[in-house]
Structure formats: structure tokens, C-alpha cells
Amino acid sequence: MRILSINCGSSSLKSALVDTASGARLLDVRVADIGTSRAAVLVNGVSEPVTAPDQAAAMALVLDAVERRGPHDARAEAAAHRIVHGGPDFTTPVRVTDEVLTRIERLDELAPLHNPPAVAALRLARSRLAVPHVAVFDTAFHSTLPPRAREYALPRAVSARFGIRRYGFHGISHADVMERVARFLQRPARELRIVSCHLGSGASVAAIEYGRSVETSMGMTPLEGLVMGTRAGDLDPGVLLHLLRAGGYDAAQLDDLLNRESGLAGLAGTNDIGDVEARAAAGDEDCRLALALYAHRVRKYVGAYAAAMGGVDAIAFTGGIGEHSALLRSRALQRLDFLGARLDEDRNGAAHLDADHPIVSIAGETGRVALLVVRADEESAMARAAAEILP
């Protein structure tokens, strides 16, 4: 089945026309730097500057490119859409109807950077593509979280009244990593304990024990956990109370602070990891601190999740930073020898992923834990998930 996968992020939109029978990507279209003067559309890697003020405009550009450049004998038969937050009800992919779309819109406040633009793109795609549309949820993979990992230590009445619990995110990516690692190691996922590190503008770690997500660093919203591009990650709630009481902040200002002004951008003035690494190498202390915090948080979660699972068989890195930053992989894996995780620095520095080599080992010969870099391919994973529920 030929499925157009649409992966709508906060500042980019990636799409691919995937033949689920063969796994071939028939067309790749990406719109980068949405909402900036640097916006560009890339069709099969060829870039062209465009005007894309928001995700709906980016979606229009993608659909134009699909209609103009797509194979004439290979039109999309369906579309799959990544939706970051599925709430408590959407734990599997679902065919989109007007009623489903309304229910998804009610979750906007739980993922304000992601759900609203994804819904806008979905509405436009439905109006222009007369094919079945399927929503695939980032939270679904984490529906297996046990109560000890799912619940917060709040009064039960408060949690029940306001629907407060941990959901986790990047589930499409973590599930794909699990499957790829299992194939690479030639062992079934049900026999493996995997720590999956999705490191990009948004970042999270998942503990995958014997084929099920049992812990993950993001919580009720995508704000919890690691240091991210513009998000603070873990933060003492007392800091927020202090800013409300003494700093003159209101809820909207806190939303901006935590979602758009913190993380690498808040520490280093930019969320471009290449710039941060270059400036750190040149002696910029703010950038050095940003890298140290970023790597420390990843390492802390890896160690914690190994303990939660009683050991670890594989640690995998994916996402833009996880795939491309040898420096951060190296620093995140420091001091983990006690787990049997031994990095080969030469392999790490030379790691290169492409369509023919979507996963590579960076482990030393004497290590007991597989250390892997995995090429992210959420679009293909979404297409496979959508195909499974379509006739």
C-alpha cells in the first residue's frame, strides 16, 4: 500500500510516500525552518527557499510537491499523520473522522507546540487528499507504562479530576528503535532490555523491557525529562511557584519560558547543536555548560533505567542529535563502564548512517552492552502502522 506519512513538528514538516509492501520511499518532501526567513522545501534532498509562516502553509507546499513530483503511477492510497498527544483514549492508530478530529483538538493544551499545528496540517490534507487518513499517536507505545511509572504522587482526587498522569512521547520512534535493534542483534524484542535515546530538538529516553515501554522521561506533557532545544526538561516545581509569586509571571509567560525560551536556547542563546559545539570548542563557557547539562541528564536517565530494568542489553541513539553528534554520544556514555557499556571512540567518530546502513555499532569489543546508532525513520513506521488498520 502506498501511504503518505506526514510528520508535523513544531518548526518542520517531514513527509514521505512509502510503499509498505517493499518499504521503499518513493518520494521525500520536507519543509524546514517554518516561520522563519530561512524556510525551505526539500524534495528528495533538493532545497528551494519558500515562504512558510506556519504548518498549514508548509502542508500546502508538501501537497503541491506530491502532486507535482510524485510518480504518476504511484499516487498515495492513504495518509498517516503523527499526532504527539493522544490522551488517555487514543492508544492505537485510528482512522480520522470528524468526530475523531474534534476529540484530538481537545488535547491541544497538553502539547501546545505540536498538536495544534499537526491538526491544522491534518485538516488541510483531508481537504485536498480524497483518501483514508489515519492518526498515529506518539503516546500510544507508552500505554504499557506500569502504575509505578505512570502516576504522579498527587492526591488521587486531584489526579482523577484533572486527568493528571504520565503519558510519554516519541513512542513512534522508540517502537521503531526497538524493532530495528532486535533485528540487528538477531534476538526477539521480548528477550531484550533496551534504553532508547531519542535526541533531537525534542528529546526523551525510554526503558523498553522485553518488548514493552516501562519508563520514559517525558510525562503528562513533552516538558518533562531531558534538556531539549527550547524546553527546560526536569525542573523543581517550586521554581515555577517562585516565578509566579515573586517574578511576576503568569501562566502564558511560564508557557513561553518553559516551551520556547529554555533548554539549549536558554543556556547558550541557540538551539543549533552544531553552533553550540563549535562555540564550546572555542571556549564559550555558556555553551560548555549547555553541553555538560545535556549529556549529564541523558547519562542520569540511562543509568536510572538500567536500574529500573535490572540491567540493560542495548543502548541506542536516534534523532538529529543522537545520530549526528559523536561528541554528545561520547559524553552521555561516560562513566557507564559499570554497566558493561564500553564505547569505541573510533567507531563513534566514524559512525555514518544511510539507507543501506540504518544502524551501526559504536561499542568496544570488550563491552557487554550493545551501543548502537539508529537512523530515525518515523515516516516508514507510521506508514506500516496505518496499513495495519486499513482494508
Image: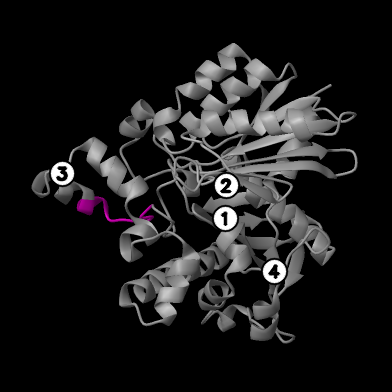
254 vs 259, left or right, is left
Say which of marks 1 and 4 sits in front: 4
Q: Amino acid at mark 4?
A: Leu
For label 3, the residue is: 244
Range drawn in magenta = 231-239
- Residue at the location (36% across, 58% down)? 265
Decide which of tag 2 and tag 3 comes sooner along the chain.
2
Q: CA distance from mark 2 to mark 3?
A: 30 Å
Say which of marks 1 and 2 sits in front: 2
Q: Are marks 2 and 4 in contact (CB under 8 Å)?
A: no
For label 4, the residue is: 372
Q: CA distance from mark 3 to mark 1?
A: 32 Å
For label 1, the residue is: 206
Q: Amino acid at mark 3?
A: Leu
- Residue at the location (76% across, 25% down)? 78
**Visible residue check, residue 88:** no
The chosen color scheme is one colour
Give the camera-side residue of 98 and 283.
283
Q: Amino acid at mark 1?
A: Ala
Q: CA distance from mark 1 to mark 2?
A: 9 Å
| Secondary element at image label 3 | helix
Q: Are marks 1 and 4 in contact (CB under 8 Å)?
A: no
Q: Looking at the picture, does residue 268 appear above or below residue 366?
A: above
| Secondary element at image label 1 | strand
In which image quadrant can residue 187 be found?
A: bottom right
Q: Are marks 3 and 1 in contact (CB under 8 Å)?
A: no
Q: Looking at the picture, does residue 150 appear above or below residue 5?
A: below
| Secondary element at image label 4 | strand
